[in-house]
Image (tube, rainbow, N blue to C red):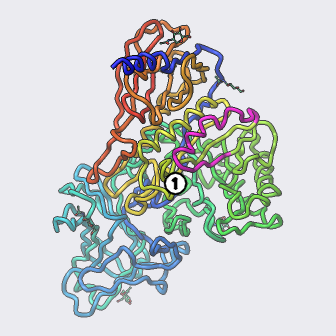
Amino acid sequence: MLPLLLLSLLSKSAALNLTVSSSGGNTSSTLQYGLLFEDIYHSGDGGLYGEMIRNRAFQGSSVDGVVSLDRTTDFWTEVGGVTLSVDTETTPLSSSLPAQLRMEVPEDTTTAVGFYNDGFWGFDVDASQRYIASMYVYGNYTGDVTCYFYSTTSDTILGSTTISLDQTESDGWVQTYSPTFYPTTTASNANNTFYFVFEDGAQLAGESLYFNVLSVFKQTYNNRANGLRTDMAEAVAALGTKYIRLPGGNNMEGLYAPYYWKWNETLGSLTERPGRPGTWGDYNTDGFGLIEMMLMADDMGLEVILGVWAGLYLDGTVVAEADLQPYVDSVMDELEFLLGDSSTTYGAQREALGYGAFTINYIEIGNEDYLNGGTTSYDDYRFTAFYDAIHATYPDISLISTINPSPVTTDGSPVDLHLYGDADYFVTLFNAFDQASRSYPVFVNEYAATNTGSNSASQIGAQTLSMACAEAVFLLGCERNSDVVVGSAYGALIKNYNEAPDTVAVIKQTASEVLYSMSFYVQQLFAANMGSSTLPVTATDGELAPVYWSATTNTSHTILKLVNYDGETGADSAVSVTLEGSSADTATLISFSAPEADSINNLAALGGETSSVTTTALQGEAGVFTVEFSSAYEILILVA
Ligand SMILES: *[C@@H]1O[C@H](CO)[C@@H](O)[C@H](O)[C@H]1NC(C)=O
Ligand SMILES: *[C@@H]1O[C@H](CO)[C@@H](O)[C@H](O)[C@H]1NC(C)=O
Ligand SMILES: *[C@@H]1O[C@H](CO)[C@@H](O)[C@H](O)[C@H]1NC(C)=O
Ligand SMILES: *[C@@H]1O[C@H](CO)[C@@H](O)[C@H](O)[C@H]1NC(C)=O
Ligand SMILES: *[C@@H]1O[C@H](CO)[C@@H](O)[C@H](O)[C@H]1NC(C)=O
Ligand SMILES: *[C@@H]1O[C@H](CO)[C@@H](O)[C@H](O)[C@H]1NC(C)=O
């Protein structure tokens, strides 16, 4: 018994003892904590973007995750014996949407006819929410079109609305909207389809009708037209971050020529948006275009880091120096569109669409331009071509290099580092920026621990508690160096659970659910508890690892973050915290943890959330507090 007693006495005196200075730190970036948005695995179409119909305009397709320009009737199924096909013979709706759905009705038809859509892995049907359906039609039909949700689980109609059509071919293409409607029943799951049914099938016997931009929206975030899926937007806003980088990411770059993300083809009427083959295996409708992204940033109070394409396609094709000018001009046009007043060509175009000027203080020139042999051309001419043109007209915009060091070495030229690796690697990054030059601000505009320290084979499906804690250790390092590390953003922000269950994201969605990962809560807590300057922390007893720390102050409060990474728990291993110059007797202690190192947050039916955040009041004395971990992997935030 004696040795055990001795041991516990010894460990008491050997525990970590931290003193947080009351001054002597550096001013922190006001942008600490950000987001990367790009359409990856249905984070735009079928994700944030509110459109519920999949393949609404027959723009392209994806089979087995390979994007193609093939126009198909995928995700559509006929009703009443009609034949559905993609037609390119009839007068098209627009030059941007040259293909339409043809519904051929057999001669002997006497019953209702039509088709239904599968949605993006189903539809969310919620009786408390308002919906609206719409479509463009070409042809002859006078009568009712019943539009309704159908549950394939209960084999029942869950709510419907009626469009009354009265048109002939001579009217050309006509867009019609349904009255808004509330479903009569909330679906028990996402296994629902959406029908368009022409009640007077006999009238159509032997004829064809043509369709394009078939659409269903549920009421959107902030009730914007062509807006965002509410639960998804609320999840993004709830992260409480300061900036968003858009529109990418590898998706901006394009797989091959000429399909980089073109700002001018994502604007205005949906009929004028051709879409493009996305980088991540599916065709992008571009319904969630430049304006929609900028409005989202405005609605959420986010500073925008505008990504502009810098002449590198992902297949390694690089635009030659002699051919680069039109792409530079296009970026200047985009900036005039976003920032110019109505006396400018593109500013006037924006005004005509009904929007005032936006604000851009940061532009990232390209994305990962070191990929596939891009480095030399980026260093030699690509970066400077864009930099010089933008800087000459907009000297106050900060221009970020995607390669470190930046080809432009003027003090203050920022770089964006992308960091991926296993959990143990993220823990080693705690010190990564301590010796960094203070002359070149750093963004980490993509990072993620993609597997646990013991499993570096491949990405795992969801972030475990230990992975999230490893990311937290890395973020402590960013915070401690927040005079030079401007901010960080996890890659990817959103992935559709049905499509990408096996790779990491902050948020994953099904048609009817939003899954908040462990990393979500880490970022949310860190963003909500960030001061305006750092504070020096000294360990008078004990040392770094397995407990890691960072302190900041927001002038009225000291915020100390502690991360236990496979460490001890309980009173014997408590951390003694002395807040220099403080007489506080109470503090707020926020804890984030989960039962096991490999606990994950999952969809409700698969176990739900295992992580929890608790907030308690902690008693101390004259600025001295004893902080105990209750879990080997845990984040504690002390605010006093
Ligand atoms: C922690 O360190 C401070 C400063 O050296 C000292 O005054 C205090 O007694 C120590 N606390 C514990 C619990 O060891
Ligand atoms: C402040 O920044 C300097 C580098 O300029 C660094 O050496 C120092 O550790 C920082 N102080 C704190 C408290 O982070
Ligand atoms: C519409 O009706 C007119 C007159 O009967 C006919 O000529 C035309 O082919 C019909 N259009 C379609 C698309 O079936
Ligand atoms: C929904 O449909 C899918 C695919 O048909 C099926 O695997 C799943 O079990 C269904 N879910 C429910 C809750 O009915
Ligand atoms: C958009 O801009 C690109 C680059 O300047 C140009 O090639 C393309 O034709 C433009 N698209 C439209 C619809 O004007
Ligand atoms: C500082 O943080 C505390 C605790 O989160 C908060 O109550 C207070 O309003 C913040 N003060 C400032 C100036 O931001």
Quadrant the N terminus occupies? top left
- What residue appears at the point 60 percent right and 46 percent down from the top-left corner? 445
Number of numbered labels in the structure image: 1
Residue 417 visible in the displayed image: yes
The extreme front residue here reads 2
Quick one: SS at disc 1?
loop
| Quadrant in the rendering for residue 305 | top right
Which range is magenta? Answer: 416-439
Q: Mark 1 points at which residue?
A: 456
Q: Nearer the viewer, residue 510 or 204?
A: 510
The extreme bottom residue here reads 107
* Whether residue 348 is situated above or below residue 255 in the rendered picture: above
- What residue appears at the point 26 percent right and 65 percent down from the top-left corner? 192
Amino acid marked by disc 1: Ser
* Whether residue 20 is situated above or below residue 145 in the rendered picture: above
Across and down, in percent, residue 565 comes to 47, 35
Residue 226 visible in the displayed image: no
* Whether residue 615 is situated above or below residue 111 in the rendered picture: above
Q: Nearer the viewer, residue 470 or 385?
A: 470
- What residue appears at the point 43 percent right and 7 percent down from the top-left corner? 621
Across and down, in percent, residue 222 comes to 40, 44
- What residue appears at the point 37 percent right and 16 percent down from the top-left corner? 618
| Quadrant in the rendering for residue 256 | bottom right
Check if residue 75 falls in the magenta segment.
no
Q: Which of 107 and 43 is in front in this view?
A: 43
| Quadrant in the rendering for residue 395 | top right
Q: Nearer the viewer, residue 491 or 606?
A: 606
Across and down, in percent, residue 400 comes to 70, 46
Check if residue 436 falls in the magenta segment.
yes
Across and down, in percent, residue 442 comes to 67, 40
* Whether residue 230 is situated above or below residue 191 in the rendered picture: above
Dot 1 crowding, Cα within 10 Å, few <14, some 14–19, many 20+: some
